[in-house]
Image (cartoon, grey):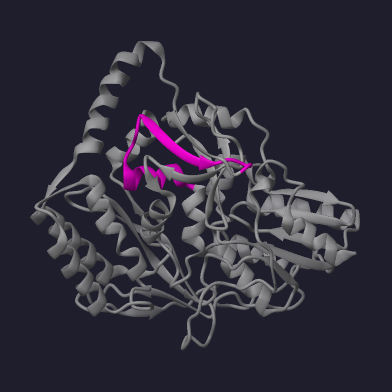
Amino acid sequence: MSRIYEKWCIVFIFLVWIVSVHAQEIILTKQQAKEDLVFLLSELKANHPNLYTYTTEEILNDWYTSQSQSMDDSLSHKEMFEIISSISPILMDGHSYIYPSESFIKYFFTAAPLFPLDVFSYQNDLVVLNDWSTEQTIPKGAKIRAINDIPIGDIKHKIINGLSRDGKNIAYPEFVYHEFFPTFYAAHFGFNTTYSIRFEDASGNSKTEEIKGMERSRMRMMRNKTPKVSSEKGIRLDVKNDLAVLTIPSFSNSMLKKDYGQKFKKEISDIFESIQNKGIESLVIDLRGNQGGQLSNGIYLLKHFMNQPFRCVSAYYKTSKKNKEKQQLVRMNSKWDDLSYPTKKNHFDGKVFLWTNGGSFSCSSIVAKTFKEEKRGMIIGQMTGGSAYTNCGGPDKSLVLPHSKILFTIPKTKYDLVSDMSEIKLGVEPDIFVEDHFSRYWNPDDDPYLDRVMEMME
C-alpha cells in the first residue's frame, strides 16, 4: 500500500470520507437485488464448469425464489452480501469466490477500524494469537466468548455459512474463518470503532474488555515488528538432525514473487540439490495453509520425489461457448491429464512425510491426492480443504453484480482427479490425524506435527 505524503493528507481524508459513506450506506431496492440474483444465476448456468456436481438447477432456482420472497423492500450492502454468500453451501465450489464491493474493499484497505486481534480456531474456541490494539488488554491464548455481545458461535456460523467450499467439506471454510477473521467479520457484521470482547483467560476467569478498531496499515506495521514463523518466510528448508522440513506456503508464482521475491522452480531445484548434498534420508513437505496456485508447480514438486510415473488429473474440461441456453462441458486435450515422470537430477529417494490441514486447498489437495494414490509416503495432519475428486481452476471470470457491485469469480476449467466420478466424497484424508495447536504460531519448534514425525523416526 502506497505511503500518503503530507501534502496529500487533505485529499486523502476527503476520499476516505466518501468511500466510507459509500461502503456503509449502499442501499438497494428489492427489484435491484432481484436483478443481481438473476444476473448471477444466468452467469453461473452459462459459464461454471462444475455447476451441477453438487447441486441441481432446481435447487438453484429454489434458492433464488426463497431469497427473493424473504428479502426486505430495501437492503444494505451488508444484507445483500449475506444473501449472495448464502449460495456458497448450495453451489459448493471452493473456487467461486465472493467479495464485497470495490468501495467496501477500498475502505477496508485504507481507513476502516478493523477487528485488531489475530485469532486461531481450536476445538470450537476462537483463541487469541496476538493483540495489536492500542489497549493491549487481551492476553495471548484467551478464548473469545463474544464480540459486541454476539456469541462467538453465532459469529462463526454466519461467517462459515457464507464461505466457499468444495462439496460438503467445511475444512477450508474453517481455515479461512480464523485466517482472515477481520475481513469476513467486517463483511458480515460491519466496521466498529470499538469492539467489546468477552473472553476467558488461561485461569478460566471471564472478563470483558473494550478495544478500539485499528487501520490495516497499522496492524501490518505491528505484525512486521514481530518474529515471523516459518510459513511467513516463503519457500524454505529447515534441517533438524536427520530430518529436513520443506515449507511451501503457496504454489502461486505471483504470490511467491510479490510476497517473498521467490521463483518456485528455482527455489525447489536449489533445495533438492541441497538435500542431496547433505545426504538427508527423511523429508517433510509442509503444505499447511498452502491454498494452491499453478498446477505445473505442484507437478514439478512431485517429480522430485515420486518413485514412478504418476498422473495428477484424470480429465480436463472447459465450458462450451456454443450453447448459452444449456451448459455443456468439452473435454480438452492437454498436458494436465498426461503421465508425468520423476526427474533424474537431484531426485529424492528417501522417506517422505506430507503435512496437510484445512488450508491445503486446490493445487495442494491435488498434490496430496497424487501422493496418497501412489503410496509415496505418510500424510500427517488433517483432511485437506480441497477436494480429492474434482477441482476447478483459473483463469477466472470476474463478475461485478450490476447494482450491489459485489464481486463474484467463476472458474473456467474443471479437473476430474479420479477416473471413477460416480462417488465424490470430501478431501484427502491423512494417514495419521494430528490436531494443530495455536502455540506453534508463537514458537515454530512447538509443533505437534513435528513431534509426531520425530516419534515415528525413533
Residue 214 falls within the magenta-colored stretch: no
Q: Residue 58: give x, y in percent of width and height.
A: 23, 79
The residue lying toward the viewer, choosing from 256 and 436, is 436
Apparent side of residue 9 relative to residue 278 in the rendered image (left or right)? left
The residue lying toward the viewer, choosing from 267 and 332, is 267
Q: Residue 230: give x, y in percent of width and height.
A: 69, 45
Residue found farthest to the top: 7
Apparent side of residue 275 relative to residue 392 in the rendered image (left or right)? right
**Residue 345 position (above or below residue 50):** above
Residue 188 falls within the magenta-colored stretch: yes
Apparent side of residue 319 relative to residue 358 in the rendered image (left or right)? left
Q: Residue at x 44, y 72 (%)?
A: 168
Q: Residue at x 37, y 36 (%)?
A: 108
Q: Residue at x 40, y 34 (%)?
A: 195
Q: Residue 114: give x, y in percent of width and height.
A: 41, 34
**Residue 223 position (above or below residue 175):** above
Apparent side of residue 1 relative to residue 129 in the rendered image (left or right)? left
